[in-house]
């Protein structure tokens, strides 16, 4: 038996090169398998992130209800409950709040001036877009850093309060050219038109505009002539959305603000003047109007109080 076993046994020798090829082949298969798993993981991750980013905001926005009347009343009460002279009265705040609540969602709200009420405006328009414009670049940057949810931009005003009569006269002379009631102010050379705002802001159909800045209490201050003129043009130049725009002018009791509003927002559009707030409702105009107001600013008009 032993001889038979020995005679039938065969010795098989493997050449080293064969072993090397076999090892290399195994490595290639392993590398290919790992690469396939990695690619599959990356594709799954990218698809998942895109799905989340494309669906989550819409779902959140759609499910966010408007503020209840009780919450709005509480916000207004606490915001106006102060003896400070730089805060709006309850009556003034409520006028703006009512306009925002009547606005179709999402509401586009433009505010000239960063004030004590900044966070209130953002809260009252929580389903819409609220943009703030201020002449102080450092304060605008500070507010955005402290409150990341606030969208604020700084703008340079080249006007002076003492120049108000000359600026209004020049705008009236150029009413059919650079200072037209309907235009894209980004390309305008009108002295009262603000043309250095972010480009995309000129394309927004603003539903509510509040002029509560810049400062205008001494001759060298910029005054609110440019802000009022710009608000008047933006409201009349809307391309879509609601054809009407609510424009509010705070400190409407000031002579300069009232005179500028008479020229460009127009008395026939004044629906209410109470406390320190003037409330105008402007309608979208045709492409080539020749005037801001249908009637002269010297005409008398009634305002409710």
Image (cartoon, helix red, strand yellow):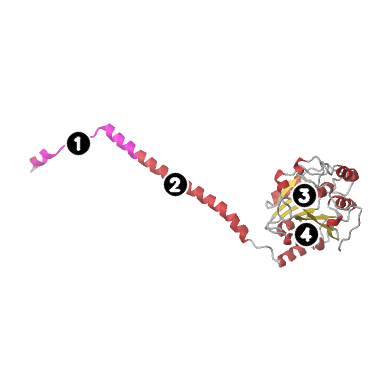
**Mark positioned earlier in the residue sequence (1 or 2):** 1
**Can you tell which of label 1 and label 4 is closer to the viewer?**
4
Q: CA distance from mark 3 to mark 2?
A: 56 Å
From the viewer's perspective, tell me whether residue 263 is left or right of residue 25. right
**Mark positioned earlier in the residue sequence (1 or 3):** 1
Q: Residues within 10 Å of mark 3 (few under 14, many from 20)?
A: few
Residue at 73% across, 61% down? 102
- Toward which corner of the image does residue 171 lie, by quadrant? top right
**Helix, strand or loop at mark 1:** loop
* Principal secondary structure, stretch drawn in magenta: helix
User: Circle 2 sits on which residue?
Assistant: 40
**Most foreground residue, 179 or 135:** 179
User: Circle 1 sits on which residue?
Assistant: 12
Q: CA distance from mark 1 to mark 2?
A: 43 Å
**Mark positioned earlier in the residue sequence (3 or 2):** 2
**Helix, strand or loop at mark 4:** helix
Residue at 25% across, 32% down? 15
- Asked whether residue 304 is drawn in magenta, I would say no
Residue at 7% across, 43% down? 1
**Helix, strand or loop at mark 2:** helix
Q: Where is residue 251 drawn, in percent x and y?
A: 85, 55
**Can you tell which of label 1 and label 3 is closer to the viewer?**
3
User: Circle 3 sits on which residue?
Assistant: 286
User: Circle 4 sits on which residue?
Assistant: 96
State the extent of the magenta-drawn residues as a range.
Answer: 4-26
Q: CA distance from mark 1 to mark 3?
A: 98 Å
- Please say if the residues under marks 1 and 4 sit with CB atoms less than 8 Å apart: no
Farthest residue to the bottom: give it: 70
């Amino acid at each position: 038996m032993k001889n038979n076993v020995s005679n039938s046994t065969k010795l098989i020798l493997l050449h080293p090169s064969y072993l090397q090829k076999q090892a290399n082949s195994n490595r290639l298969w392993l590398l290919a398998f790992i690469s396939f798993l990695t690619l599959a993981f990356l594709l799954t991750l990218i698809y998942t992130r895109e799905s989340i980013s494309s669906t989550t905001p819409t779902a959140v926005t759609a499910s966010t209800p408007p503020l209840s009347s009780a919450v709005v009343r509480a916000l207004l009460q606490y915001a106006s409950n102060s003896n400070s002279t730089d805060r709006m009265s309850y009556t003034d705040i409520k006028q703006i709040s009512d306009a925002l609540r009547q606005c179709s969602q999402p509401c586009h709200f433009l505010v000239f001036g960063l004030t004590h009420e900044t966070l209130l405006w953002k809260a009252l328009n929580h389903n819409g877009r609220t943009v703030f414009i201020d002449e102080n670049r450092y304060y605008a940057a500070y507010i955005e850093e402290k409150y990341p949810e606030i969208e604020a931009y700084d703008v340079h005003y080249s006007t002076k309060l003492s120049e108000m009569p000359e600026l209004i006269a020049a705008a009236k002379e150029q009413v059919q050219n650079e200072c037209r009631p309907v235009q894209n102010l980004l390309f305008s050379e009108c002295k009262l038109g603000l043309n250095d705002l972010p480009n995309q802001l000129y394309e927004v159909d603003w539903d509510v505009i509040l002029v509560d800045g810049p400062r205008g209490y001494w001759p060298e201050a910029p005054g609110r002539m440019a802000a009022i003129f710009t608000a008047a043009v933006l409201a009349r130049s809307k391309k879509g959305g609601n054809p009407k725009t609510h424009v509010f002018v705070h400190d409407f009791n000031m002579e300069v603000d009232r005179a500028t509003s008479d020229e460009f927002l127009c008395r026939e559009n004044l629906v209410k003047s109470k406390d320190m707030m003037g409330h105008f409702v402007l309608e979208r105009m045709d492409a080539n109007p020749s005037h801001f107001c249908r009637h002269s600013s010297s005409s008398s008009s009634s305002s409710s109080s």
